[in-house]
Image (tube, grey):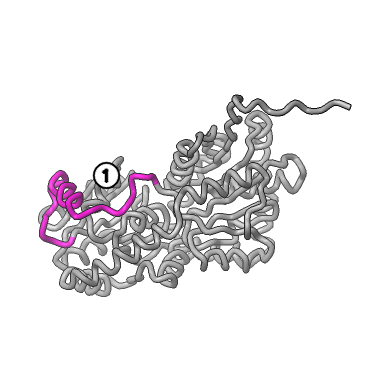
């Protein structure tokens, strides 16, 4: 009888291999993937071996239109996008299309990729990536553990498929929402995946940031952001800020036409229009309030920085769903009318304690759970460790 040799105590443990799948339909999915990679790559006592793959780049022949179709539907055909969002949530045949047909296209590319990478765990930050890996698992073409990291505050059925080992969401309410879609699902609450540079800032950091960015030191500074494509009612949000006596810092992302228009027609006192910003943490440090319309990466970063968050005219589909969830958990009021937003901002400008109360709620939510908890859970799944549900 042969006895297995005892492991050499001096032999370093093998670094776990982690594959993170994203799709650059919106920067929020990429931001989450990058942040998760950073969390896992800097873990203690030793880092994981992490690779991030953008599935749109892998399926370029079929995927280049996806970001454009998304922007067109949200911006120009919001009713159609809302109907699609509700159809996937409520109609089995519509959900089945993504589970079987759309997923099959991406799974055909992913199968060989998984064979080459041989990861210990796959983490997805886009629902079509989730659907593709789950399909491979259902067909026994891979047995790699699959964790879906939901990038929106409000879960949607577009994310939920048989074959997913665990879902990571941002709140207990979101956990219950996933379990209503799949009563057997393993769901855990995680902090949003944001870079470690996003955290509550002391007042001195705010003063320094405003000086560097040439922003007024004695006014309510409001960051108006609508994602990388700057979709939605940014002009009305800017007007509300200025009517409330505040200063609007508008991030136009990759929307150069909007940037040029704002600088040409609405420049002057009370507004700073910016294009693509690499150091968003500096803007969060400088501002008091963040106005958003989607409830994705920007909202997560605002809360992580302890900034008061307002949802203004949320975009169709996931934007409206996230606004409802954020309101339900007491993290962000929703304003659908410009005058309503003006009144809210003016009330915070005139009552600093009310503003600080909103900021404290955001900071407390960010502190409820740590990235280290999420890392331990993910690597526990990779090692086959049973984690409490």
| Residue drawn at point x = 30 percent, y = 61 percent | 291
Percent of width and height locating residue 246: 16, 63
Q: Is residue 374 one of those drawn in magenta?
A: no
Q: Nearer the viewer, residue 324 or 339?
A: 324
Q: Is residue 123 visible?
A: yes
Q: Which residues are magenta?
A: 195-220
Please report the residue visible at 56 percent of the width from the left and 64 percent of the height from the top.
Answer: 175
Pinpoint residue 126: horizontal percent, then vertical percent.
Answer: 54, 48
Quadrant occupied by the N terminus: top right
Q: Secondary structure at mark 1?
A: loop
Whole-percent x and y of residue 86? 56, 66
Position above or below: 3 against 248: above
User: Which of the image's four quarters has the C terminus?
Assistant: bottom right
Say left or right for 16 vs 68: right
* Residue highlighted by disc 1: 275
Horizontal side, residue 231 vs residue 207: left or right: right
């Amino acid at each position: 009888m042969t006895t297995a040799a005892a492991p050499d105590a001096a032999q370093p443990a093998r670094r776990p291999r982690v594959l993170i799948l994203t799709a650059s339909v919106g920067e929020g999915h990429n931001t989450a993937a990058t942040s998760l990679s950073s969390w896992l790559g800097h873990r203690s006592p030793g880092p994981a071996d992490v690779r991030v793959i953008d599935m749109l780049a892998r399926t370029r022949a079929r995927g280049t239109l996806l970001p454009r179709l998304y922007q067109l539907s949200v911006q120009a055909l919001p009713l159609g996008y809302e109907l699609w969002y509700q159809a996937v949530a409520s109609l089995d045949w519509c959900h089945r299309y993504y589970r079987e047909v759309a997923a099959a296209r991406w799974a055909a590319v992913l199968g060989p990729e998984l064979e080459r990478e041989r990861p210990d765990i796959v983490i997805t930050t886009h629902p079509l990536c989730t659907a593709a890996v789950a399909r491979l698992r259902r067909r026994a073409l891979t047995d790699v553990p699959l964790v879906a990291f939901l990038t929106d505050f409000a879960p949607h059925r577009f994310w939920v498929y048989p074959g997913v080992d665990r879902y990571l969401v941002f709140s207990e309410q979101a956990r219950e929402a996933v379990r209503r879609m799949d009563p057997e699902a393993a769901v855990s609450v995680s902090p949003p995946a944001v870079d470690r540079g996003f955290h509550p800032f002391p007042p001195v950091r705010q003063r320094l940031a405003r000086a560097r960015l040439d922003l007024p030191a004695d006014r309510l500074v409001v960051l108006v952001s609508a994602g990388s494509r700057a979709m939605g009612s940014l002009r009305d949000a800017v007007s509300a800020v200025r009517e409330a006596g505040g200063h609007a810092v508008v991030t136009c992302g990759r929307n150069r036409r909007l940037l040029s228009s704002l600088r040409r027609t609405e420049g002057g006192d009370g507004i700073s229009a910016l294009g693509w910003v690499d150091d968003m943490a500096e803007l969060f440090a400088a501002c008091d309030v963040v106005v958003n319309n989607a409830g994705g990466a920007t909202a997560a970063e605002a809360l992580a920085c302890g900034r008061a968050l307002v949802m203004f005219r949320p975009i169709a589909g996931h934007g409206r769903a996230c606004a409802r969830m954020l309101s339900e958990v007491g993290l962000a009021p929703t304003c659908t009318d410009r005058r309503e937003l003006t009144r809210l901002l003016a009330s915070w400008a005139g009552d600093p304690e009310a503003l600080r109360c909103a900021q404290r709620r955001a900071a407390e939510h960010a502190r409820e759970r740590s990235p280290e908890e999420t890392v331990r859970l993910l690597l526990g799944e990779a090692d086959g460790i049973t984690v409490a549900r």
